[in-house]
Image (tube, coloured by chain):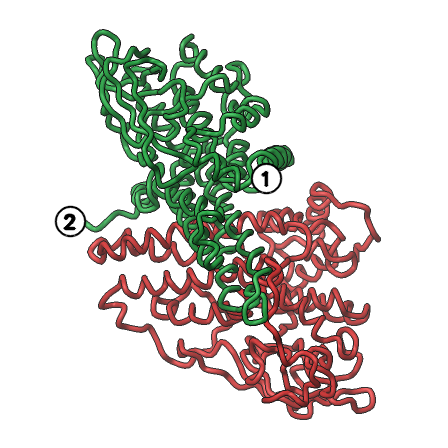
Chain colours: A red, B green
């Protein structure tokens, strides 16, 4: 391992030098993909803003682009980030922020290389927007916790080796205080994963039933009863992961419908033209706003502004995909395939117009509903007073359910 | 296309702070209202402080012509602050539109350079004599309603000209035997009548200009007059987006402040979700409006080939955001927002007038259809 200790600053030139060193020692053309990824992690070039020894070099986050560009130019394999988005975007920052040294050493490397897929056991049938109401129980039994409950909307659960899990450890405390955060082994015999079919016909997500699942106390992240605070880190990163990618003009949903518009003049109507121009303008405005936000976030942690992008893209994706189905007319009455399928990757702009229309409905629900995000903006950005609440200071067990 | 800079530089932040401090001091809402009711075309003392003493009148004019040699990025910051204050000063009309048109003429010409220097130093106030509703980015020059005669005089009428009432010099598009041209006319001439109109926007009043054999000096002929006017209108429209952003920003800030303080049903009304969501939605609008306005300013400043798209997107977007913010401001203020005394109406009137100024959002979207290849249905 080339962990040469802490550096005051690692600049772009130093990173390029280290990339060359990596490429010389492990030529991508003759190196096994996994071996290369492990070597890249050990060289501190996985996520350069992470600490040395954990895949990074304590370098500014903005310099990751330098490494990615150099490696891409050299034809090096990547870790297929879209397949392991939950691990990279949510589990990893939480493990880094709250994990013990042992947990970080054991978990981050196979997480980043994709050897171990992660999923997230947060939402429950009775705890969606009000996540802190969750009812999955974790009861202490010697050095272990015994977990019982049901989780829902879990993507990748059927592929995952590990899960980040929040469960109630003290029902006598008010709802936000009696929760703890765990790392759950998905191969435990008490874990049962069932596909959850959605309105598109496919099953991206799962229901996960937890029955007598044993989790050693050494796999707790953060203190007992501090799970809610730990989960905030995960959720902030989720919103950025969903709304934060860089896109060129017409790079998203609008490009698809603009393409159909250009190629199929026979479908055009004046009403659709006006709506298309409006959506094109709004898409471009949202794209520029995302670009501006990304510059501001290039260094430092994501804040509530990430919610702005998620809200904008949810609304636009829904309106644009709806317009496309309408534009297609007779073809819009057809659907490509209702078969129950289990896609490994989800592409909001994939498949056909009907699928995109239906899938986009989830964009304003998953990762925080648009209504909850508007509350967050109103309270955290604008500083408006919260609604009076009756559930905050009452023991969880006494809340009406 | 190089990567546009959508943030504010340190120098731009400093300029903003200076302008804001002056406006906070000299242009509070109450004085905007009394100034608007005074019958004066604009606030002369404020314009002297802002345009001449602070030097903002010459931001777009190169140093060697008596200006500050800055760019549309800095001018956009000034426009944002002027929007926030609905300040009754001829910045858009003189320092942007009139100066912009002159910059498109041959600045080696002594008459052009002299006029530019006078505008840049705030010694003189100019106005481009076209209706404020003239759409920027439209193909060709705006049709001239004024005739240039062989004796070097102009005759005709231009309606709905912003900034004409307080102007010393009018830049008039006119057609004569020599074709289309841009002419300078002194408003002091007896053959020039500037009749103030009762305008929707009290803080940027319009006037009808009538010329009856007015002595004029030709500044540009058919070879460059249309392009000079077109570029001035495009610059004006791009910078107007920043003014609209400033208007919207004031409206949201004041609405948030009011709804935190105002109590009904034993609670601050800003704690009701129905109101919070409307203000959060406005904040989202502002985030994207700022990005489009910055992009337009940066495109103008760097003379990007994407400027027409950037300006059309910014105008189509920011015009509607400003109107929505001002309308929400009136509604969420309740009864007080409907009074003459409260400044909300000044912002509503400015926002609605700005929506029509230099092309409505619909016209800018129509321009985009051509610019980004999204053609209308045939027939």
When the figure is inspected, residue B162 is found, relative to residue A194, above or below; the finding is: above
CB of mark 1 within 8 Å of CB of mark 2?
no
Camera-nearest residue between B304 and A386: A386
Q: Is residue A19 something one can see in this rendering?
A: yes
Spot occupied by residue A136 in the image (x, y as percentages of width and height): 65, 86
Camera-nearest residue between A30 and A386: A386
Answer left or right for B106 relative to B375: right
When the figure is inspected, residue B121 is found, relative to residue A140, above or below; the finding is: above
Q: Residues within 10 Å of mark 2 (few under 14, many from 20)?
A: few
Spot occupied by residue B349 in the image (x, y as percentages of width and height): 40, 44
x 62%, y 72%: residue:
A117
**Chain designation of label 2:** B
Spot occupied by residue A4 in the image (x, y as percentages of width and height): 83, 52
Separation of residues labelled 1 and 2 (CA atoms): 45 Å
Camera-nearest residue between B201 and B136: B201
Q: Is residue B298 something one can see in this rendering?
A: no
- Dividing the picture into quadrants, the one containing residue B237 is top left
x 66%, y 84%: residue:
A187
Q: Residue B8 shows which numbered tag?
A: 1
Residue at disc 2, secondary structure: loop
- Dividing the picture into quadrants, the one containing residue A399 is bottom right
Q: Residue B379 shows which numbered tag?
A: 2
**Chain designation of label 1:** B
Spot occupied by residue B168 in the image (x, y as percentages of width and height): 40, 18
First-in-chain label (1 vs 2): 1
x 31%, y 41%: residue:
B367
x 15%, y 49%: residue:
B379
Q: Residue B102 shows which numbered tag?
A: none
């Amino acid at each position: 391992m080339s962990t040469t200790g802490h550096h005051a600053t690692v600049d772009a030139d130093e990173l390029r030098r280290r990339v060359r060193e990596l490429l010389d020692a492990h030529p991508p053309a003759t190196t096994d993909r996994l071996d290369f990824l492990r070597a890249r992690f050990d060289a501190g070039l996985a996520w350069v803003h992470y600490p040395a020894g954990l895949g990074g070099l304590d370098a500014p986050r903005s310099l990751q682009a330098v490494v990615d560009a150099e490696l891409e130019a050299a034809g090096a394999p990547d870790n297929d980030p879209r397949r392991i988005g939950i691990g990279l975007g949510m589990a990893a920052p939480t493990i880094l922020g709250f994990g013990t040294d042992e947990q970080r050493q054991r978990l981050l490397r196979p997480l980043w290389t994709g050897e171990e897929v992660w999923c997230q056991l947060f939402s429950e049938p009775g705890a969606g927007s009000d996540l802190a109401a969750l009812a999955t129980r974790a009861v202490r039994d010697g050095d272990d916790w015994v977990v019982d409950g049901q989780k829902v909307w879990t993507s990748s659960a059927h592929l995952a080796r590990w899960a980040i899990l929040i469960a109630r450890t003290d029902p006598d405390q008010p709802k936000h205080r009696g929760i703890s955060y765990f790392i759950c082994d998905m191969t435990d015999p008490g874990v049962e994963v069932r596909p959850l079919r959605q309105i598109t016909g496919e099953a991206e997500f799962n229901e996960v039933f937890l029955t007598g699942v044993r989790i050693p106390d050494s796999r707790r992240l953060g203190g007992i009863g501090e799970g809610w605070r730990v989960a905030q880190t995960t959720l902030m990163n989720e919103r950025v992961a969903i709304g934060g990618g860089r896109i060129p003009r017409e790079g998203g949903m609008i490009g698809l419908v603009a393409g159909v518009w250009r190629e199929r003049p026979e479908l055009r109507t004046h009403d659709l033209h006006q709506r298309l121009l409006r959506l094109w303008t709004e898409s471009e405005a949202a794209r520029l706003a995302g670009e501006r936000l990304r510059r501001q976030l290039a260094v430092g942690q994501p804040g509530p502004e990430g919610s702005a992008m998620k809200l904008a893209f949810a609304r636009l994706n829904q309106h644009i995909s709806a317009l496309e189905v309408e534009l297609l007319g007779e073809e819009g009455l057809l659907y490509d395939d209702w078969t129950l399928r289990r896609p490994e990757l989800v592409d909001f702009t994939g498949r056909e117009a009907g699928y995109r229309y239906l899938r986009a409905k989830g964009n304003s629900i998953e990762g925080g509903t648009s209504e909850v995000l508007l509350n967050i903006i109103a309270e955290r950005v604008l500083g408006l007073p919260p609604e009076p609440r009756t559930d905050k200071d009452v023991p969880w067990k006494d809340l009406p359910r | 296309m190089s990567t546009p800079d959508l943030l504010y530089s340190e120098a731009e932040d400093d300029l903003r702070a200076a302008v804001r401090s002056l406006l906070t001091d000299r242009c509070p809402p109450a004085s905007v209202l009394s100034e608007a009711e005074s019958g004066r075309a604009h606030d002369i003392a404020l314009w002297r402080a802002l345009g001449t003493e602070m030097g903002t009148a010459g931001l777009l004019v190169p140093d060697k012509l008596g200006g500050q040699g800055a760019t549309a990025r800095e001018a956009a910051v000034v426009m944002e602050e002027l929007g926030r204050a609905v300040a009754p000063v001829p910045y858009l009309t003189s320092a942007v539109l009139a100066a912009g048109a002159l910059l498109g003429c041959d600045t080696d010409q002594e008459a052009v350079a002299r006029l530019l220097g006078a505008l840049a130093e705030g010694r003189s106030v100019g106005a481009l004599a076209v209706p404020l509703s003239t759409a920027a980015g439209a193909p060709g020059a705006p049709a001239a309603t004024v005739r240039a005669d062989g004796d070097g005089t102009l005759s005709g009428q231009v309606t709905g000209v912003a900034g004409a009432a307080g102007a010393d010099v009018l830049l008039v598009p006119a057609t004569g035997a020599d074709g289309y041209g841009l002419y300078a006319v002194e408003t002091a001439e007896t053959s020039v009548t500037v009749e103030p109109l009762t305008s929707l926007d009290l803080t940027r009043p319009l006037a009808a200009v009538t010329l009856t054999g007015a002595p004029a000096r030709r500044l540009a002929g058919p070879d460059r007059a249309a392009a000079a006017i077109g570029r001035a209108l495009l610059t004006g429209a791009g910078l107007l987006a920043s003014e609209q952003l400033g208007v919207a920003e004031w409206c949201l800030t004041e609405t948030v402040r009011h709804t935190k303080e105002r109590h009904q049903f034993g609670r601050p009304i800003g704690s009701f979700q129905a109101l919070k969501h409307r203000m959060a939605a406005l904040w989202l609008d502002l985030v994207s409006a700022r990005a489009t306005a910055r992009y337009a300013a940066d495109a103008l400043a760097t003379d990007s080939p994407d400027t027409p798209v950037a300006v059309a997107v910014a105008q189509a977007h920011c015009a509607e955001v400003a109107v929505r913010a001002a309308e929400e401001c009136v509604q969420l203020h309740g009864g007080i927002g409907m009074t003459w005394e409260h400044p909300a109406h000044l912002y509503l009137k400015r926002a609605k007038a700005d929506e029509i100024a230099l092309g409505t959002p619909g016209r800018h979207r129509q321009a985009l259809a051509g610019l980004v290849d999204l053609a209308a249905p045939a027939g």
